[in-house]
Image (cartoon, rainbow, N blue to C red):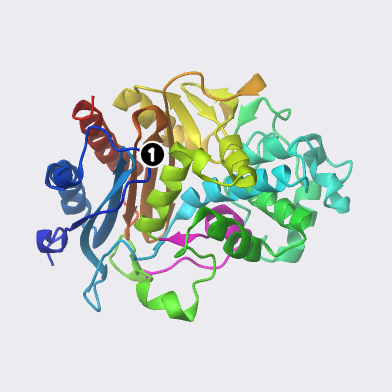
Amino acid sequence: MTILNRSLAIALVSTCFLPCTSWAADDSARIRAIVDNAIGPVMAEHDVPGMAVAVTVDGRSYFFNYGVASREKNTPVSEATLFELGSVSKTLTGTLAAYAQVLGKLSLTDHPGKYIPQLRGSPIDKASLINIGTYTAGGLPQQFPDEISKDDQINAYFRDWKPDAAAGTQRTYSNPSIGLLGHITSLALKRDFADAMETALFPQLGLRHSYIRVPDGAKADYAWGYSKSNKPIRVNPDVFDDEAYGVKSSSADMIRFVQLNIAPSRLEAPMRRAVEATHVGHFRVGDMVQGLGWEQYAYPIALDRLLAGNSRIMSSEPNAAQPLTPPEAPSGPTLFNKTGSTGGFGNYVAFVPAEKIGIVMLANKSLPGPARIKAAHAILEQLVEKNP
């Protein structure tokens, strides 16, 4: 099978979400050329079965779909195809936690022991919820140890955990960390985490085709992921999988989420405040500022610096973190981004509110992060050049 079937690449234009300026609906062919030129080589090099790409420019959405959601059934990708978001899910977990704070159900300055009595007085209880949500608790690992396989082992694991550093001094990217934030959020809301996401967060954001638990009626839209050996796979259940990397969503829903992050004023006040809270920076780590889910950079950003901020060193090793005191929203043009992957999917989301541009890239193969970021950076740079 060819890795890019251009006959399946389509562009659909939505109504304006924000006031439209330089780009217009009839520019879809020009934008498609930009996207095709960046995405085609990536799919060819990494043998990607399918990709759904969406961009937003001046509040208008453009969709570009490539290849297939299932090689076995030859199902074409569309803007309704469900992809496993992987760690892009963390931006939604962070939004739910911020929403719980807006509702007065928790405070991000609280400590875990307030919600999990077994953790009171333990080393993890010295970290605040914002430390847990920004991977600065003191060295929680990227993944749980293999022996932690059941939910009833979680509290004992965190109770006995020994930090490598004082809370707030280093960033160590961690699924257990953001997973604990999501778990505590669900306790504060007195709701199952998946239920809170699917019945509280997603509807208020207008995400009508996003799920933690894909229902029977949507399973036909759920793409198959493909391993390095091109075997069809989907994510396996694991501890805190829902909280850390469990969302399945479409490019249509995710570009809407991007647009709401670009213009939160369209939301009702509580959710607007929650989305705005995820844009606040809490720790500086090199060129990157860590917020609640989103990672941000002063814009414009050179490609090498963006790659460094999303490198293996940043995702797999401890990095010194400088607290921003007080935490601060960006004071100038800023690029927000997040990568995400599971065993069979690879994604990237980025947006620049000041330029009113953003991109969603969803693939059903876990292609390397640098390949995603280079393609997205090239697309965004050309959108800015053509949108003075």
| Residue at 52% over, 39% down | 265
Q: Is residue 178 above or below residue 168?
A: below
- Using the image as rendered, state which of residue 328 and residue 168 is in the foreground: 328
Does any portion of residue 22 appear in the rendered image?
yes
Does any portion of residue 320 appear in the rendered image?
no
Q: Residue furthest front?
A: 19
Q: Quadrant of the C terminus?
A: top left
Q: Is residue 237 magenta?
A: yes
Query: What is the three-letter code of the residue carrying label 1?
Result: Ala
| Residue at 46% over, 33% down | 313
Q: Position of residue 15 (x, y in %)?
A: 31, 51
The residue singled out by tag 1 in the image is 350
Q: Position of residue 261 (x, y in %)?
A: 47, 40
In screen coordinates, is 264 left or right of 221? right
Q: Position of residue 125 (x, y in %)?
A: 81, 40
Disc 1: CA contacts within 10 A as few (<14), some (14-19) or many (>=20): many
Q: Is residue 176 above or below residue 232?
A: above
Q: Is residue 41 above or below residue 320?
A: below
Q: Which residues are magenta?
A: 233-249
Task: Give the image quarter of residue 307.
Answer: top left
| Residue at 70% over, 43% down | 102
In screen coordinates, is 294 left or right of 184? left
Q: Is residue 248 magenta?
A: yes
Q: How many marks?
A: 1
- Using the image as rendered, state which of residue 346 and residue 105 is in the foreground: 105
